[in-house]
Amino acid sequence: MEILNGFEPTSIEKAVELLRRGDVVAFPTETVYGLGADALNPYGVAKIFEIKKRPRFDPLIVHIGEKDWIFKFAENIPPETTRLIDKFWPGPLTIILNKKDVIPDIVTAGLPTMGMRMPSHPVALNLIRALRNPIAAPSANPFGYMSPTKATHVAKMFENELSLILDGGSSTFGIESTIISIKENKIYIRRHGAVSLEELSEIAEVIHEEKKDDQCGVPGELPYHYAPHKPLRIVSFPGEVKIANSSLLAFKKTEKTPLSKYVKYLSQRGDMREAAANFFSYLIELDREDVDIIYAEKIPEVGLGKAMMERLKKAAKNVGR
Ligand code: TXA
Ligand code: MG
């Protein structure tokens, strides 16, 4: 693993090269360090989850390099957004917006919305601008750990998993961005963070509802998981499928043609990262009006397979909603 001075143009070049190849690079932001991948490369984004060892997929924040990139990647932008980004961008405010189709589904864990922000850290901005694509990034800590604010923290946490960390010094805020959504001229705080409620109140009425336990498990998290409309059943192998008017999410290529009307193979060769990169978009595609049920083949619960199975089990519980 290499730690390079992020203020050096050659370090940025090297990082961009890795990101273009679908690799993950740790980089500094003004809040905390992030584990970044090219947001438009689902394979690279899958690698983030692999490295972070999250037991499930959480939607990631999309980091942009210029304010007007918002129009390229978001749609139905609420009018208050203009004043918010004039005041707080670049900076630690993440706004939940409807995503355009160019943002892969794995970035948002199947949600139609995404969290977007333009960071102010010069290394982060240089990196995003040099890549010329947004960077999807969670905080650079393994699941369940605290967010790192120094390159050395990240190095310790991911000694073997990362090839490059850009060092940009200590993060000035040291806490994560504030996450908000906007509805009917009101600002809803989804996660408290580096921008305060008082500062936001200068723009519009701010609402912060304490979330109930059944709505979200962990503070700062939303009941955001995409659930298919059709009932979903997990099968051990494609041969178990008995209803032809169905779709099937198969893990890898099988010899016999399955019975289902629509079949998608997550990865022909059984590669977990490729499977994860396809997972949400395939599930959304298979959730069709003209089928009675979605079957999903069991995925080996190793690496990203765990996160995928967690999603499938949750979706299978929704049967009979
Ligand atoms: O300061 C920060 O926000 C840092 C730096 C790297 O930018 N990032 C960060 O990411 O804290 P992460 O993944 O650790 O936390 C982002 C949280 C998710 O856990 C989720 O709660 C929320 O953002 N989030 C992202 N997209 C969302 C969406 N579409 N709807 C609701 N919540 C979303
Ligand atoms: Mg985090």
Image (spheres, helix red, strand yellow):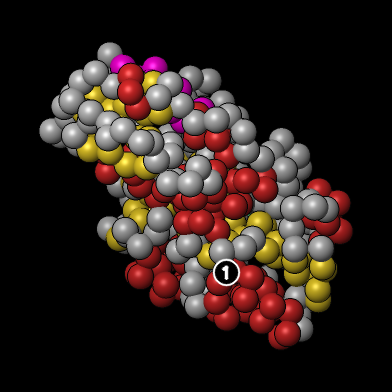
Say few, some or many: other residues with alpha carbon within 10 Å of mark 1 (under 14 / 14 to 19 / 20 or more): some
Q: Please state if 311 lies on the left or on the right of 255 as rendered.
A: right
Residue under the point 38% across and 36% down: 254
Q: Which residues are magenta?
A: 310-319
Residue 40 part of the magenta-drawn span: no
Residue under the point 62% across and 76% down: 17
Residue 261 visible, this orientation: yes
Circle 1 — which element? loop
Q: Residue furthest bottom?
A: 9
* Residue 101 image point, x, y percent: 31, 58
Q: Identify the residue position indicated by label 1 in the image.
A: 21
> How many circles with numbers are drawn on the protein?
1
Instruction: Please name whichever residue, 250 or 91, is drawn nearer the observer in this view of the structure.
Output: 250
Q: Residue furthest left?
A: 290
Instruction: Please name whichever residue, 161 or 180, is drawn nearer the observer in this view of the structure.
Output: 161
* Residue 178 image point, x, y percent: 58, 50
The answer to which quarter of the image holds residue 292 is top left
The answer to which quarter of the image holds residue 227 is top left
Q: Tag 1: residue type? A: Arg
- Name the quarter where the N terminus is drawn: bottom right
